[in-house]
Amino acid sequence: MASSASTPSSSSSSSANDLRILVERDPPESKLSELNIKCWPKWGCPPGKYQLKFDAEETCYLVKGKVKVYPRGSSSSPSSEDQFVEFGAGDLVIIPKGLSCTWDVSVAVDKYYKFESSSSS
């Protein structure tokens, strides 16, 4: 008797499913202080569409802005346009290494960011 619980669909062999963007809405000030975010470099961009590839994991905190991120890789299916992650001002976001995506920026972005170095544990 086969059990569907032994093979959950989330453990798919497709790497695109493993590249998830994690968004923490309005993290507590204590967490932002612990991460020392105000010492991180800043980056900003005006509204528009940007093709990005992340060669390292990035953690960022949006001071301003609103973004919809459309991961690439499943663009051949018409439903891929529905698969996006939206975040904005006040969100702490972790973007996985290896993600190729389109950023659709509707409100100009101003963010602190940090790339994980490969030597960190």
Image: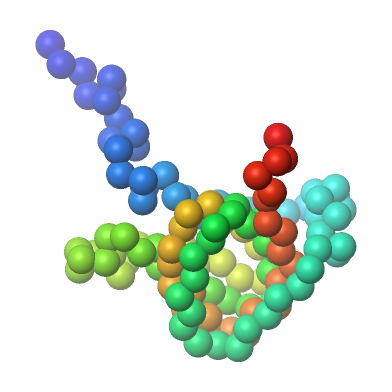
Q: Is residue 111 visible?
A: yes
Q: Residue at x 27, y 25 (%)?
A: 7
Q: Is residue 121 left or right of residue 49?
A: right
Viewer-closest of 17 and 85: 17
Q: Would residue 84 appear left or right of 74 to someone viewing this image? A: right
Q: Is residue 106 above or below residue 37?
A: below
**Where is 109 relative to 15, above or below?**
below
Whether residue 69 is visible, yes or no, is no
* Location of residue 81 in the rendering, given as x and y in whole percent from the top left corner: 30, 70
Most foreground residue, 88 or 72 = 72
Please name the residue shown 46% across and 83% down the image.
49
Residue 96 in percent (x, y) is at 53, 52
Horizontally, residue 94 falls left or right of residue 13, namely right
Residue visible at 63% across and 83% down? 45
Snapshot quadrant of residue 108:
bottom right
Q: Picture quarter containing residue 26?
A: bottom right
The C terminus lies in which quarter of the figure? top right
Q: Is residue 25 above or below residue 42?
A: above
Dividing the picture into quadrants, the one containing residue 120 is: top right
**Colour scheme of the rendered structure:** rainbow
For the N terminus, the image quarter is top left
Most extreme residue toward the left, as rendered? 1
| Rendering coords of residue 35 (x, y %) | 81, 51
Left or right position of 105 against 7 = right
Q: Residue furthest front?
A: 119
